[in-house]
Every structure is written in structure tokens, then in C-alpha cells.
Amino acid sequence: MDIKHSSPSVIPDHEPSTSEKVLAFLDERLGLKEMQAKMLNEPIPGGSRWAYVFGSILLFIFAMQAVTGTMLMFYYVPTADHAYDSTQYIIHDVDYGWFLLSYHFWGSSAMVVCVFAHMSQVFLWGAYKKPRELLWLVGLALFGIVITFGFTGYLLPWDQRAFWATLVGVEILDKTPIIGDFIARFLKGGASPGQMTLSRFFVLHVMILPAALMALAGLHIFLFRVAAPAGPFKGTQEEIKAKTDYFFPRQIWKDIVGMAFVFVGLCALALWEPVVLLDKATPDPGEYHPEPEWYFLFYFQLLRLKLFGGQFGQFMGAVALPVLFMGLLVALPFFDKDPERNIFKRPIALISWIAIMVVIVLFTVAAVINREFLD
Amino acid sequence: MLQPKLKSKVRCTDHDIGEVTRVVLDPLSHEISHIVVSMNGSGERQVMMTQVQDVTEDAVQLRAPSSEILALPPFKREDYVTTHEVEISHLEDNIHVTPGEVLVPIPDLEKSVKRRTFFMNFTHVIGFLIGLPLAYPVLRFLMKPMYANFDNGWLKVGNVSKIKQEDVGTQFKYMKHVKEVYMPEYEVEKNVWILRATPDLLERVYQGKDVEFHDAKGKAIWTNKKDVPYIAFSGKCPHLGCGFKWRQHKALGQVFLCPCHLSIYDAGGKVLDGPAPRGLDALPLKVSPSGEVEIIDMEFKAGTKSQIRIV
């Protein structure tokens, strides 16, 4: 058994079948077996866990978004006079159009949820620490891309919900000092939202962001492989080694079960809560109360605070707060140099995470309660 | 201590027992954890590094007698993969025992090349020269629709007979023709809030002064006279640009309320509550003797204390 698996000098005990010959032909040129071995035989310190499924699930959701999104482009027309009608056509006339569109719509929510879970897990496990700083930074960039995906995709159906969420979102970016006006006009392609805005958001959504996400996700996985999985935050080296297994089969099994759950969940959401468009976009909101997608509700509610009122307050809420938050996350692995990874021995980290959760939940609930008060 | 080399003789306390055929690495510490000893014809044994007393250039001295090593179970190759078949980065960084250097000859043509640094920099300069002339055209290309002149035309929005009560906000919807670049001209629905103001409210809004409106060059285009009892407010909330409404508020009575971030304004457009940085934006307005209202459709930047016109 000294001979390498891929070595052609292995003499089989039977005449190779055609498929074996084809495989051997490819393997000789591509090194498939070695590649497969390298992909599957990745030791996971401390063994596979359900907590580790989110990265794979995110890849799965992205793949499904790419597939459903490509399908939608067969009918969708990104123009101010046809975007709404073509989306309605997808929903009402194209066979299973409602399903593909709704799956794509709910897929974006799933993406945000899983990004949040993935980031939380890395944060709580202390897995952003040395030597995984770059992995964390690229992850943050991917987080930004996912959020931008949601924001740009929201406009494309060109209904009232789309129009107003975009209008307010761009106004928030407009609050950036010095370059804010330029950014807002650049995104809108003018002073007010219209065809130019739709074109720009479309290009971002279907071309620039997917390319950026694929490149950065590739880099993310590469960095992950270079740095190796962090493993559990407690247990001696011996205990961890005793439980270590490879990526295949146990972790892949857990990942695939997680993906199946997400798939079934998204299908169920698409079935029970299919996308229904509001009226066509127009600068008159009528009786519609503008509101962003649910995962932005807490921030929407935060901006209602008097604290973030007035020109300076708005700068604080719309620019300083998000920039500061992202800045802290970027700086995190560089000022948190304590090698301790156990979250129960990192009180500041644990309290910060809980505080952020509490703020998000409270403000989301407040936004929902406010809805009733408005009607 | 040196690392055990391949082919090194292995000595027990009594006599030589064979030679090193492989080493086993610990995947966590990346250190050598075992050596595999070929036992002069009696198979291979796996010996822990703790058993090793000393390593010299060509020999490994063990702490145990040969009988003890022979008594170990035979080495099982099928329990291991090679470093080429597993992805553990930098696994081999800590081993210094290799069969020797692996050499590849440099091509003859490469040997005579001088000025490698020059060629490297030259490549970068050419790349830069390709990119540089593109940067400005691409920027201008993308900026084309960003800045447009203001439209100061008057738009008919309805008749004041629609207003039933003084100091009460009434919404007037109107269609605005939009011609955006290559698109066919189309109409968008917009809205403006108009009040018939009591002298009291007029005084509060105008504070005794007419209000002048200017075009982009600063030339006056219209003056809202302080004694005209009608006021028109742009339908865009000065906080973040949503559309506000006229609503009954529990504590504040009848007010303009923006459902987005809950900015509240009184009938004169003054901020009563909420995050808005300035009051509602009054628009140039004229009312014909028959009561037809015309406005200039202006939009101002949201979120600033002062009015900055953008449309």
C-alpha cells in the first residue's frame, strides 16, 4: 500500500471499464483524486458540529439565489416603464414564476439571517483571533456585499415598497460628510429616483455584486483553509485531538441536512407567503407607510429616536453609528489580542453581543408596534 | 536534538535494529510524533519520539532494548495518508528531514536575462498607462445623468375650492411630465399640501417678510407674498424624504405626521416633534382669480438644517 492512489502504475485486478478509463484519463490530467482528497480530508479540530453549518449553508443559499435570479432575468426588464409589469407577469403569468420569485425574495432574508448566525458564531467562539484576522476581515466585506445585495434587489420590482425603501436608503447615504451628495446622485443617477437609478441598481445587483461576492467568497474559503478551522474554545489538546474528524463525512452530513432545512423552509415561505407587489412606484406614497425589509426595521426604528434627530443627530445615526460599528468589527482582532477564546471568560465580548441582540430585538418589536399605532 | 533522518540507523540499548523509513507528524503541533523503523526484515514498527534518547547525523538512539521494540505491534500503513493527500497548511514546515534537495534546471534562455527589475517595473508602468487614460472617461461616463438643471415651470395642481377648512392640510395630487434621457416621456404622480391660512398662521409662517425663490444662478424667480392666504408645502419630508400626511395626534391635535420616522409638524410646517432637522419646505405658489393653484415643483435635500434645492 505504499503506492500513491493516483499513481498510474497500480495494476488493477480486472480489465478497467470504460467509465474507469475516462476517470483515469481525467485524473491523470487534472489530479482529481488528490483534489477531492484535499477537499474532503480537512481535519476539524474537536470534530464536526451543527454550529459549523452556516458557512456551507450561505454558499448554498448564494448558489440558489444565482440560479433563481438568472431565471428571473429571462422575463424581467429593468426599465421604469416595464420593471413593474414584467415582475407582475412573472408572478401572475409565467408558470412557477411566483415560486421562483418568492424563493429568491425569501432567499435574501435567509442570507441575512445566516450571515448573522455565522458572524455571531465566529464572534462567540473567538475564531476571529490570530491567526484568522484576514479571514474575519474578508467575512466583514462579504457581510457588506450581502446587505448591498438586499438593498439593490429591493428596488427592482419597482413597486411602492421598492421605491420608498430605496429613496430613504439613499437619503441615509446622502448624510455622509463631503462625498454624501455625490454618492447619492451617483447611485440615483440624478437628483431623484428614476430610470437611471433602476439601471444602476440592476447592474450592481446582477453583475458587480455577484462578481465581488464570488471573488471574496473564494478568498474567504482559501483563507479558511490556510488558517485551518479554529475548533472548540475549550478542552485540552488531547481531548480535541481525540474528537477530531475530517470534513467528510460527518460535517458534510450536517451541512447537507442544514441546507435541506433551509431549502424546505424557503419553499414553505414561498408557498405560504408568496411575493405580492404593491402599486407601481410613484413619488406619491398615497396610503402606503414606507418601511424597509424586516431585517432593517431595528435601524429604521433607531432613526426615529430624537437622539438621531436634527442635522447633527442624523449624521450620528445615519453615518457615524454604522461606520463606528463596522469600524469596531474591523478593528476587533487587532485590539482583542488576548488568546482566550472561551466566551464565558470574555465578559466584555459576551455582554456586547447580548446588548446588540437586545437592541435589535427591542427596536424591531418597537417598529412593529408602531405600525399599528400608525394605522 | 536533531530530527531523525530517513535511512538513519536505529540503535536500541543492546544493538542496531534497523533504519528509519518514515516519520509521522502530529497534525496539531506539526511536530514529529513517531518514527517508523524497518526492522531488518521483521516488518515495521512505530516508535514514539519520547522513546528516542538521541539523534545524530546518521543514527537514532532509543531508550529501550530491541526486544521491547520488536514486541510493538506491526506498523499499519493503511492508517495514514501522506501530506499530499490531506490539507493541513504548513504541516511540513517543521520537518527538516528530507531525502535531500529536489532540483529543476533553469532554462538556458533565462540564464542570460539581465535587468529583471527593469522589466518588472516596465510591466507595471505599461499597465498603469493603460488604466490611467480610462479612469477619467469612465468616471464622466458614469456621472452623465447626475446633475441636471432645475425646472422652474409652473404646474397646475387643482382648485382651492377643494379646501374646506382654514389651517387644515389638504393634499393636492398632480401629474408631472418626466422626460428622462432616452426614455419616452411619462407622467409621475406627485403631491403637494396646500393650506388656506388664517392671518395668525400667515404671520407665524412669514414673520412679516415675503419669501423669495431663486434659480440655480441666484436670480429671483418668484416671491411668495406674505398676505396671500395660501401656503403650499412640498410633499417630501425634510427628514429622510418620505411622504407625510395630515393626521389627528392625541396630544398635539391636527398635525402633519411622517409615518417613516415620526417627524411631526404643525400647520405652518414648524417641527413639533421627531427627528426632522428643519420645518416643511414651502413652494412658490400662485392662485388665479378663479382659484386655480399653480406651483413650481421644487425638491430640497432632506436631512439638512438649511434648504438646499436639488430638483
Image: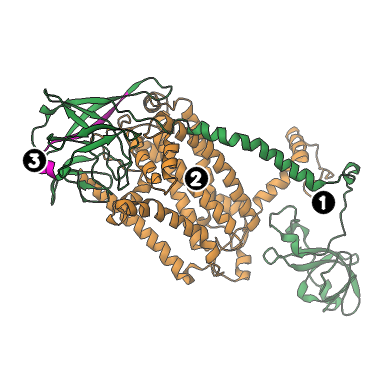
Chain colours: A orange, B green
Residue A234 image offset from top left, x and y in percent: 54, 69
Instruction: Give the residue displayed 42% in from the left and 53% down from the top.
Output: A322
Secondary structure beneath dot 1 equals: loop
Disc 2 marks a residue whose amino acid type is: Ile
Q: Nearer the viewer, residue B21 or B88?
A: B88
- The answer to whether residue B201 is magenta is yes
Disc 3 target residue: B199
Disc 3 marks a residue whose amino acid type is: Pro
Above or below, comparing residue A154 to residue A134 in the picture: above
Q: CA distance from mark 2 to mark 1?
A: 46 Å
Chain that bears disc 3: B
Chain that bears disc 2: A
Instruction: Give the residue displayed 56% in from the left and 32% down from the top.
Output: B137
Q: Is residue B115 visible?
A: yes
Instruction: Give the residue displayed 86% in from the left and 54% down from the top.
Output: B102
Disc 2 target residue: A145
